[in-house]
Amino acid sequence: MQAAYIDKFGPSSEIKIGELPRPQIMNDEILIKTIATSVNYVDTFVRSSSFKTKVDFPLVIGRDAVGKVVETNDNEFKPGELVWTNSMGYDGRAGTTSEYVAVPCERLFHLDKSLDPIKVVASLHSSATAAILLNDVLNVQADQSLLVEGAGGHVGQKLVTLAKDLDLKVSTTSNSNDFSTLQALGVENTYDYHQDVSDITERFDYLIDTSGKIKLTDNVDLLNVFGKIGLITTPPDALTPEKIAQLYTHSQALMGFVISHATVDQLQDAAHLITTAFSQGKLLDDDVLTLPFNQAEKAHRLLENHENAGKKIILKF
Ligand SMILES: NC(=O)c1ccc[n+]([C@@H]2O[C@H](COP(=O)([O-])OP(=O)(O)OC[C@H]3O[C@@H](n4cnc5c(N)ncnc54)[C@H](OP(=O)(O)O)[C@@H]3O)[C@@H](O)[C@H]2O)c1
């Protein structure tokens, strides 16, 4: 089968396109024929090994996929059925940028045939991240307040949509071009990200910066007592001892999260939540740039150089 893979960690130029053996399925696996994969920052981190994880070379790259079942030992999945996965390509599992992928049953989910597979695969990574972050990591409660910084982005918009479904009061920082989209999703206060966050007078029960550009020191000041920050990117500064004292004396918490460490239970709960949202037409609004799968190297380069114009890159078979 044709695949995009690496023989060693390194820059995007390490990505090769070529023939690899079609995988043989084990008892707990389903063989799918890939329709499309998405390219996310995390794929570049695994490829370069800036995120350390167990891999076997040659490593087929890619984490998410939509596809069709071709071979199965499990009654839950029927040949020809549309399915998706979002946790391949790390922790010893082969990735998804190949014509066929053997996916463990517990990591495979049904895809309603009325949905556009490209829109779905574009949404999976950011939607699952947002779902697990809100429900499990921050354990958000209805009627509390959330600030999403960088809310115009892929993760940001998913956080807003899911937080509104959970009855949170949501405020955002974004480019002013994104205000109308965010207001349509139910955001109460939209702040322009060109404004200093220190000028925001509201205080929040939860705060998530998706941009990685806001000082943690400034964000701590925006929290209510018992407030929590969900950390999914690296902020530009470090906390001083005074700020750490401020955190604990206000019973506040910093909660780190990376979806690569999500448990199967967390991935399955998130799958249930986002599948329900998909069926209501939600979470499917990512702008998409579609390339043929053999342009995987270009896709990684575009993303790493921020030349994707904010679009989610999809590799199509
Ligand atoms: N930990 C995890 O498990 C996990 C999972 C998924 C993603 N992530 C990380 O989350 C981050 C966001 O991913 P994404 O796909 O949502 O990226 P994205 O679509 O590029 O979103 C980033 C957003 O930040 C905005 N922004 C830029 N400068 C800003 C500023 N000074 N203040 C506020 N917002 C600003 C951007 O606006 P403009 O477009 O106007 O520049 C953009 O809308 C990435 O670093 C990614 O690696 C982590």
Image (tube, rainbow, N blue to C red):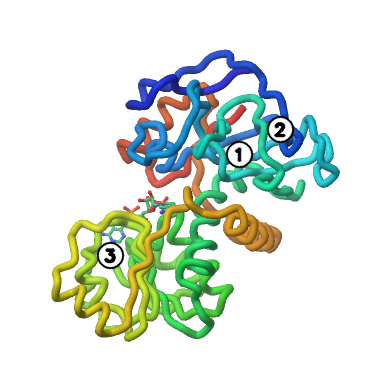
Quadrant of residue 127 within the rendered picture: bottom right
Instruction: Give yes or no for contact between labels 2 and 1 (Cβ–Cβ under 8 Å).
Output: yes
Say above or below: 202 vs 177.
below
For residue 60, side relative to residue 231 (left or right): right
- Type of the residue with mark 2: Ile
Question: Is the CB of the residue bearing disc 3 within 8 angstroms of ligand 1?
Answer: yes
Residue, x 66% and y 26% (percent of image)? 100
Disc with the residue nearer the chain's start (2 vs 3): 2
Image coordinates for residue 170, horizontal then vertical, percent: 44, 76
Indicate which label's residue lies in the foreground, 3 or 1.
1
Mark 1 is surrounded, within 10 Å at the Cα level, by few (under 14), some (14 to 19) or many (20 or more) other residues, namely many
How far apart, in angstroms, are the residues tagged by discs 2 and 1? 9 Å
How far apart, in angstroms, are the residues tagged by discs 2 and 3? 42 Å
Disc 3 secondary structure class: loop
Disc with the residue nearer the chain's start (2 vs 1): 2
- Type of the residue with mark 1: Ala
Q: Nearer the viewer, residue 51 or 4?
A: 51
Q: Which residue is mark 2?
A: 32
Question: Is the CB of the residue bearing disc 2 within 8 angstroms of ligand 1?
Answer: no
Disc 2 secondary structure class: strand
Q: Which residue is mark 1?
A: 65
Q: Nearer the viewer, residue 190 or 103?
A: 103
Question: Is the CB of the residue bearing disc 1 within 8 angstroms of ligand 1?
Answer: no
Q: Which residue is mark 3?
A: 193
For residue 176, side relative to residue 182 (left or right): left
Q: Which corner quadrant of the figure contains ligand 1?
A: bottom left
